[in-house]
Image (cartoon, grey):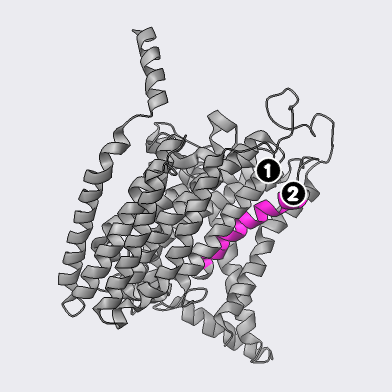
Amino acid sequence: MISDWAFIGIFLFLSIFFPLVPILAGVLLGPHKPGRVKAQTYECGIETRGPSHIQFRASYYLYALVFLIFDVEIVFLFPWAVAYGKFPLYAAVEGVLFILLLGAGLIYAWRKGGLAWQ
Amino acid sequence: MGDLFTAITNLLRGLLLGAGVPAAYVPWIFAVARAFVLGVSGLTLVIFLIWFERKAIARMQDRIGPNRVGPYGLLQTVADMLKLLLKEDVVPPRGDRILFHLAPILAVMGVVGLWAVIPIAATAYGVDLNVGVLYLIAAGTLGTLGILMAGWSSDNKFALLGAFRTVAQLVSYEVPTVLSLLVPVILAGTMSLNGIVSAQGAIWFVFSAPLAAAAFLIASLAEVARAPFELLEAESEIVAGFHIEYSGIRFGMFFAAEFLHAFTIGAMLAVLFLGGWQGPGAAQFPTLGAIYFAAKTFLCYFLLVWARATFPRIRIDQMLNFCWTVLTPMMLMLICAVVLVNRALADSTILLRAAALLGANILVGFSTLALFGRRMRRPHPHLHARVGVEGERIA
């Protein structure tokens, strides 16, 4: 038998080719007639002004930060979710306390206005 | 006929060994074959899914839908695909070329990769990972990365706006999705998807945790960025969003990834909450289990299509508020309730525990509505002002 993760590796390696083959076929089968107009940015018909990589609003950044905090902490909950049944009741209660702390963090971010779209 | 999958495997193993292939190579050949069959059948299914969705939505909108190419328009998608293949492949000369080429590949990889762990029947699955649920989360995120890369590398303001919205939407809804995935893990006591399916032999988790199933459905609708949540490609606002600069089959790959992802969400719902292949007689006859699984998956997929045809697109502030101030606190409360009820009643009968869990779900649902529901009905202050002025003009 081969290990589980070897199969995942084979699978992900193979799944590179599932999109790659049609894309290469498209490149080979399609016509190739580059032109000045085709190379323009596809926006409104008139030529685009200024750089495309514009500044973005800070709200997006705030959401990404809140997400990071939550996601990292939720990952810790997964081993607990598997194992809490094998421990006495206090293990379950401690997990709940951890979640309540998470909730307090959420309420803090909320009260500070970090979750309001401006 | 009872166990088609084992029969085929044994037949192929016999053929390979008979042809003189060393026994050490056989598992590797089987791994490659399994991966190939899963991936190719997934992507072939997309052809049918696109036809099904167009037809179903057409019926809901009192239209006929595709009906020219092939019987019932079944070959319409094949014709569309051929056309996409024969289109010119335009690559914007500016922007980041490497990321631009990588993005559609990652988008498809992230979706096809999910099928490695989804159990189709008792004896038919890619692999039974002991951290299957975590793998689902991790592989699913590859698609988000693909969208982000596409938006950034296209050198187009609309595409970049789409990518910004991706950050806000997909990243925000990742939190309730992961939290709702935690509930089946708590109930089954394992992260392996086969383990979760076998734990639902007596009672499906949709009955003991309906709120988690609903939260997973809504949050994953946002994760695949479909109809009520399709802000990152809203046609009327930012043209096509992140894939605006993509043409031909490169665009087709994003399209295929989106449809397969929606179907995969249906499969995940079926596995995590509807008992996967469980059903009368499925344990003895795995072939029957695969049919049950397919039926449940299609039912869930139909729910997604139905939602797409029913709900109008929501505003970005509504979407983010709903995620952070309704879904996330609700799921945190639900996890606390489920853990405590499940732990306190660990020694009682399955039915009693399921009833108590259902009661806890209803309680959490109603308290969420009471605590946070009223806020959601308030209109956006700016929008409210504008509607007032326009209303006066009409009056």
Query: Magenta stretch containing residue B100, yes or no?
Result: yes
Image quarter (top left, top right, bottom left or bottom right) of the C terminus of chain B: top left
Q: Residue at x 43, y 64 (%)?
A: A74
Q: Which numbered tag is attached to residue B144?
A: none
Local crowd size for mark 2, using a 10 Å CA cut-off: few (<14), some (14–19), many (≥20): many
Which image quarter: residue B19? bottom right
Q: Which residue is mark 1?
A: B84
Q: Look at the numbered disc 2 and give the secondary structure of its residue.
A: helix
Q: Residue at x 80, y 29 (%)?
A: A37
Asked whether residue B71 is in view, the answer is yes
Image quarter (top left, top right, bottom left or bottom right) of the N terminus of chain B: bottom left
Q: Which residue is mark 2?
A: A26
Main secondary structure type of the part rendered in magenta: helix
Q: CA distance from mark 2 to mark 1?
A: 8 Å
Q: Nearest the camera: B83 or A34?
A: A34
Q: Amino acid at mark 2?
A: Gly
